[in-house]
Image (tube, rainbow, N blue to C red):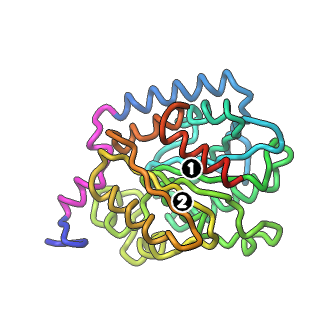
Amino acid sequence: MELYKGMDAATLEAQYNLGALRPDLPEVQKRWLERAAAHVAASRALVDLRYCEGERERFDFLPGGDASGPLLVYIHGGYWQRGDKNLYSWIAEAFGRHGVSVALPNYDLTPNVRIGQIAPQLRRAMAHLWHEAQALGFSRDRMHVMGHSAGGHLTAMMMATRWDEIDPALPTGLFRAAVPISGLFELEPLVHTTINAGPRMDVAEARAESPCNIPPVTDAPQLVVAGAAEPAELIRQSDDHAARIRTATRSVERYNVPDADHFDELEPLAQEDSVLFGKVMTLIGANG
């Protein structure tokens, strides 16, 4: 039976159950965790800082420059039901060497919360970072946001936020640029997969929380990334998102990481000679 755009349940499952395509994912994540811990230990990282009072309302801050330097906020993925900032601190390695500080916030996970509660929670984290910029040591006028998978969805939600409605002190253009990586911009397909075991979305909620229905509110440029070896639906989502948000005044670049799947596409972020790292640094340099 067709459930979404001509796809049945088996097809949707094959396209979106990304962990099933990588049976070695636990080993990959173990290496990430070890690498992240090593980088935190070797750096001047500040860990488990609070942005609110909830148990997971904490962030890590890895300084890369002085108080006039830029900040890159990295939002982890995990289909809104798993994942942790502690897996990804290694992403700050190369950025730190180029004077870019990195913040990694955690957020509550489904099914303990509804998916619609996560973006507001992260908005509080971003507001906290803006207010604490001087104390942490970066420029509040040079903030950028990046996220992977579910974090890509949340990155898009941050770019669709009217920040002055969250806090009158905040500028409308809180972020100077964004990098959603393999983001989920259209959530309705997931309703018909086992991925929905955590979010438990119905179609109405999926549509309400889909960035495809919530456009950005500023003309800040974006770099929309996917892995060239990902399932066709993930590539399609990034293609559609880039086309949808590109305007005469908003620059949007679309890039596929060669030969990379949904997980390996992150590796170039820590490789200073990679095309992806260069593109992100160019975006940060040109826009803050």
Residue bearing the label numbered 2: 154
User: In x, y percent, where is residue 46?
Assistant: 73, 35
Q: Label 2: how many residues lie within 10 Å, few (<14), some (14-19) or many (20+)?
A: many
Amino acid type indicated by mark 1: Ile
| Residue 286: numbered disc | none
Amino acid type indicated by mark 2: Leu
Q: Label 1: how many residues lie within 10 Å, few (<14), some (14-19) or many (20+)?
A: many
Closer to the camera in the image, 15 or 232 = 232
Q: Which part of the image, by quadrant, shows the N terminus?
A: bottom left
Q: Residue at x 77, y 43 (%)?
A: 69
> Do tag 1 and tag 2 residues touch (Cβ < 8 Å)?
yes
- Give whichever of discs 1 and 2 has the lower sequence position: 1
Q: Is residue 11 magenta?
A: yes
User: In x, y percent, where is residue 128?
Assistant: 76, 55
- Separation of marks 1 and 2 at Cα, in angstroms: 7 Å
Residue bearing the label numbered 1: 75
What span is in magenta? 9-24
Report the side of 29 relative to 125 (left or right): left
Q: Residue at x 48, y 35 (%)?
A: 274
Q: Secondary structure at mark 2?
A: helix
Q: Residue at x 67, y 58 (%)?
A: 176
User: In x, y percent, where is residue 67?
Assistant: 83, 42
In the picture shown, does residue 50 fall above or below 117?
Answer: above
